[in-house]
């Protein structure tokens, strides 16, 4: 039971978090009528009568996308973790991300609810039974984040803004790629919790590490959010350790004091990185490129001088 | 033989007991009505009353309130309250029956395998991500129900294999099988290593009515009515079973068969309830004890009164669970223990002499 609690905590550390970075919100677009059909992230084609006008977001990354597309005034409900941009936190709360209050959602009369695969077992069918349109998105790669932005743009008649945002993100990703191309790839251990939960294949963090010019030591694990043993980490001898659990209390000093860790190259050479603002690497939303740029600098300080 | 005082009790006070049960029934209805008007999404109680009135009279009130309010009251809150009522009633009655049949004050409806079996069933369904649906029930409910029944059946057969089942072997077999199933469940959860599934299993094991629906109410109600009614019919035999097995046999109660039937019915009722709501602790242990402390141990009264008190208690607990941290929800099991335990301790101190007897 304890293990599972830790796993949940680790998952939350990945999926949630807090951050303060600026975002541009272009506010244009005249509502057009006519049905809109878009395939969601799990292969269901969702049809709206017309552009969504009353939107509830069940995840912080969806909220950030909506605001980045200038749709803040169409958002009628968010979760307690939706803290970016700051005005999103002023919206009515419909839940704490894992548990969603059905009567709040229904009572706010949304014409579109943006959910994640976390909600598919319970909340999604419960909402659909009550006639509410639910669109599931759970991007687990940087490309999938770009697709999410485009899909949300289609549902809301903000295709142009979505394309502009995606083009901007693609340009920044390409710039990073250009820099790190050909450079030796440091081995990276991404710590999600002191129990050594990490990001494995099939997670957007794994994608992020690769794009930033690193090599995830857990890339050969058997699940997206695996738990490694201390021995495995010492054996892998990572060049860089990223403390994505810094906000949960882990520090460079604490890592140095862990028995056996002083021999790991990252610890010896002082390449243990505390991530103070973990939202930019834990939310598969528009600010993921900021996380990517941060990581590329951390992995390749010499290339970014 | 029944003691003289007990007989007197029953003969002299049937009317008083009838009145008490009636009062309990009225309390259930009052609590239900209060809870319908109370929720995280605020709708004025007067409007809620008008909405009910409109349903009853069939009058037209188009535009008097948003359609969404209708959904909130009649598709979310009402089925939720009814489901909480049914599950609370089922757990309290099964608890009373288990305590009686095992002659053990620590017995609760999960004593012999229901929670472990249901938990494993639910975990398998969640870990496999089965897209199975039947009559408004998901794979999780179906697997939990089958798991609970199967676990109890296995325990019963194991405990009987040495000849006659004694309550002690049943309880011990229950502990061992329960531990085994829990280990399998933990293993599956650990291997799944998938945050979303783990959260789902954890949430399920803590119990919740957040996903109540009319389909669940319609499926559960007849099972509980039939099972609960039959158990009530066995109340007198449960009284006799309080004597030791030989004495009960001499009084003409077939101990082995009665035990099998009563445990079977209580398990069916509990499994059905648990499959709809997850594992909610404490209600099945404490409610029957509280009823016994206040009104005495006669099962003919204990069982129906536990049903009513369990229903009231669960509806109130769920009312807190869905509003205290709004919009987040507390697991209802947290509320049942947090509020129920102090109340029970209070009763215990006030009525210590009853237990000492």
Image (cartoon, helix red, strand yellow):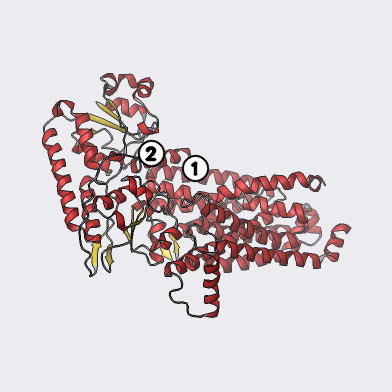
Q: In the rendering, at what x and y percent does residue B16 appear?
A: 80, 65
Q: How many marks?
A: 2
The disc numbered 1 marks a residue on which chain? B
What residue is pinned by disc 2?
A10
Q: Is A266 or A202 nearer to us in this picture?
A: A266
Foreground residue, A221 or B357?
Answer: B357
- Gap between marks 2 and 1, in whole Å? 22 Å
> Which residue: 75% across, 64% down?
B20
Left or right position of B205 against A72 = right
* Residue at the extreme right: B4
**From the viewer's perspective, is A79 left or right of A150?**
right
Relative placement, left or right, of B67 versus B113 is: left
Q: Which mark is residue A106?
A: none
Q: Secondary structure at mark 2?
A: helix
Residue A176: quadrant of the picture:
top left
Q: Position of residue A253 (x, y in %)?
A: 36, 21
The residue marked by circle 2 belongs to what chain?
A
Q: Nearer the viewer, residue A299 or B176?
A: A299
Q: Which quadrant would residue A19 be assigned to in this image?
A: top left
Residue at the location (80% across, 48% down)? B354
Can you give x and y, in whole percent of width and height, for residue A218 in the image? 28, 35
Percent x, y of residue B117? 53, 52
Q: Nearer the viewer, mark 2 or mark 1?
A: 2
Residue identifier under label 1: B183
């Amino acid at each position: 039971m304890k293990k599972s609690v830790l796993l949940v905590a680790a998952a939350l550390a990945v999926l949630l978090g807090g951050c303060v970075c600026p975002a541009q919100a272009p506010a244009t677009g005249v509502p057009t009528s006519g049905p809109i059909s878009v395939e969601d992230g799990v292969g269901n084609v969702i049809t709206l009568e017309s552009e969504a006008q009353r939107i509830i977001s069940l995840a912080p990354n969806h909220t950030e996308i909506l605001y980045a597309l200038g749709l803040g005034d169409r958002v009628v409900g968010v979760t307690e973790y939706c803290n970016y941009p700051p005005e999103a936190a002023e919206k009515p709360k419909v839940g704490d991300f894992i548990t969603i209050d059905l009567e709040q959602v229904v009572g706010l009369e949304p014409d579109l609810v943006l959910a994640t695969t976390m909600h598919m077992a319970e909340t999604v069918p419960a909402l659909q039974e009550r006639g509410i349109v639910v669109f599931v998105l759970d991007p687990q790669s940087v490309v999938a984040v770009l697709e999410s932005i485009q899909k949300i743009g289609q549902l809301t008649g903000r295709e142009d803004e979505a394309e502009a945002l995606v083009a901007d993100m693609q340009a920044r990703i390409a710039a990073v790629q250009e820099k790190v191309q050909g450079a030796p790839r440091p081995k990276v251990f991404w710590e999600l919790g002191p129990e050594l939960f990490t990001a494995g294949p099939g997670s957007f963090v794994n994608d992020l590490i690769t794009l930033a010019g690193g090599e995830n030591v857990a890339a050969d694990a058997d699940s997206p959010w695996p738990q490694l043993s201390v021995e495995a980490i010492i054996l892998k001898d990572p060049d860089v350790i990223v403390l994505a659990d810094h906000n949960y209390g882990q520090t460079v000093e604490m890592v140095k004091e862990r028995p056996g860790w002083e021999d790991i190259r990252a610890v010896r050479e002082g390449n243990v990185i505390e991530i103070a603002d973990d939202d930019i690497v834990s939310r598969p939303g528009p600010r993921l490129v900021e996380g990517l740029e941060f990581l590329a600098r951390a992995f390749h300080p010499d290339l970014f001088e | 033989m029944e003691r003289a005082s007990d007989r007197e009790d029953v003969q002299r006070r049937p009317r008083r007991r009838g009145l008490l049960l009636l009062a309990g029934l009225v309390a259930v209805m009052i609590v239900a009505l209060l809870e319908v008007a109370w929720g995280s999404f605020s709708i004025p109680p007067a409007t809620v009353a008008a909405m009910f009135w409109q349903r009853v009279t069939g009058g037209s009130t188009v535009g008097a309130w948003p359609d969404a309010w209708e959904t909130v009251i009649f598709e979310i809150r009402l089925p939720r309250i009814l489901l909480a009522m049914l599950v609370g009633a089922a757990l309290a009655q099964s608890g009373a029956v288990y305590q009686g049949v095992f002659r053990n004050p620590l017995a609760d409806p999960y004593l012999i395998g229901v929670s472990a079996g249901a938990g494993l069933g639910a975990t398998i369904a969640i870990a496999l991500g089965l897209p199975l649906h039947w009559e408004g029930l998901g794979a999780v409910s179906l697997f939990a129900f089958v798991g609970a029944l199967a676990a109890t059946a296995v325990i019963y057969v194991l405990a009987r294999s040495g000849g006659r089942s004694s309550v002690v072997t049943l309880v011990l077999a229950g502990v061992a099988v329960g531990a085994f199933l829990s280990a399998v469940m933990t293993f599956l959860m650990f291997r799944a290593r998938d945050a979303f599934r783990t959260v789902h299993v954890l949430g399920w094991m803590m119990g919740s009515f957040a996903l109540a629906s009319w389909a669940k109410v319609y499926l559960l109600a007849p099972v509980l009515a039939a099972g609960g009614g039959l158990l009530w019919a066995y109340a007198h035999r449960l009284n006799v079973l309080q004597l030791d097995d030989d004495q009960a046999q001499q009084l003409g109660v077939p101990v082995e068969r009665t035990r099998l039937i009563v445990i079977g019915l209580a398990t069916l009722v509990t499994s059905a309830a648990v499959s709809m709501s997850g594992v909610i602790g404490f209600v099945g242990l404490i409610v029957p004890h509280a009823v016994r402390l206040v009104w005495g141990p006669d099962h003919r009264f204990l069982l129906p009164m536990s049903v009513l008190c369990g229903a009231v208690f669960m509806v109130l607990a769920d009312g807190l669970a869905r509003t205290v941290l709004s919009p987040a929800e507390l697991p209802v099991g947290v509320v049942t223990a947090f509020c129920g335990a102090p109340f029970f301790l209070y009763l215990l101190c006030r009525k210590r002499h009853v237990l000492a007897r």
